[in-house]
Amino acid sequence: MIDTSPETTRRAFLVCSTGSAAALALGVAPAQATPESLDAAIKAVVGTARLRAGKVTLDLPPLVENGNTVPMTVSVDSPMTESDHVTAIHVFNEKNPQPHVMSATLGPRAGKAKVSVRIKLNDSQKVVAIAQTSAGEFWTASADVIVTLAACVEDPT
Amino acid sequence: MGHALVNVPASVKRGDAFEIKALIAHPMETGFRPGPNGVLLPRNIIQRFTCTYNGVEVFSLTLSPAIAANPYIAFFTVATESGSLTLRWTGDKDFMAEETVPITVTA
């Protein structure tokens, strides 16, 4: 049924290693987000508004053994009332193939601005969380994560 | 389609925020990995998750390939009245899963 532990079989490893070798031989660099594309993705959300550090807590383990499933919790310090609440929480990363990780839409009915998901991390990198409030303010927090086994390098089947 | 597990408290006091934990079986294939023949596996992810409380949307999430396989999503909502929560996952290849759980609100 639901099994989140990917097992590396010998076959999967061989498939994966030959795949990467082929990619290297062809000189095809795998697509990867860069700090620039991270900035661009953040700018697309924030626009010209001011981005301030604080209020957001980004919970990620500092050392990750398996980049395929990394538990992440984002919480925002907000009263979550009709007049003052968090409207959205966005998460971005620096080195996965795409900078976008998730965007959550919340409202005063959430009661508590806290979202947990499990994410994939392709490399040791910086993860950025941004919260948008009903007042139009943007708050941010970031976390640096060291990943020992990167996601996307093996076939979990 | 799909196996989903949803966890909510048995009963909640009116006005309290309670946590909803949802887990669904899905490969979340990124579209960036080569398959056994060296060709990239096509992307197959859940793109969107929504939760409605008695018909009103209280939470939604846009997912990306960076969400781990078998997505686990936990979030909060305030107990207003007894009724049901409907969680819906939609994604690539016309993926659609829906789960409805009852919620009992006490005074």
Image: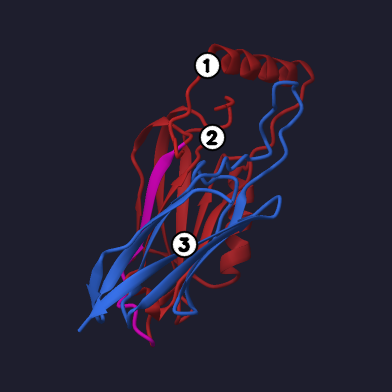
Chain colours: A red, B blue
Give residue A130's mark: 3
Q: Residue at x 34, y 78 (%)?
A: A80
Whole-angstrom CA distance, mark 1 to mark 3, is 38 Å
- Which disc number belongs to residue A122? 2
Q: Nearer the viewer, mark 2 or mark 3?
A: 2
- Mark nearest the camera among 2 and 1 is 1
Query: Pointer 1: what residue?
Result: A9
Q: Earlier in the sequence, mark 1 or mark 3?
A: 1
Question: Subunit of mark 2?
Answer: A
Residue B90 percent across, percent down from the top left:
61, 58
Residue A69 lies, with reference to residue A111, above or below; the image says: above
Q: Amino acid at mark 2?
A: Asn
Dot 1, crowdedness within 10 Å: few (<14), some or many (≥20)?
Answer: few
Spot the residue most to the bottom: A83
The secondary structure type at the circle numbered 1 is: loop
- Kindly indicate whether the residue at mark 3 contacts the one at mark 1 (C-beta within 8 angstroms): no
- Amino acid type at circle 1 is Thr
Report the residue at 60% width, 62% height from top. Answer: A43
**Side of A81 where B39 appears, left or right:** right
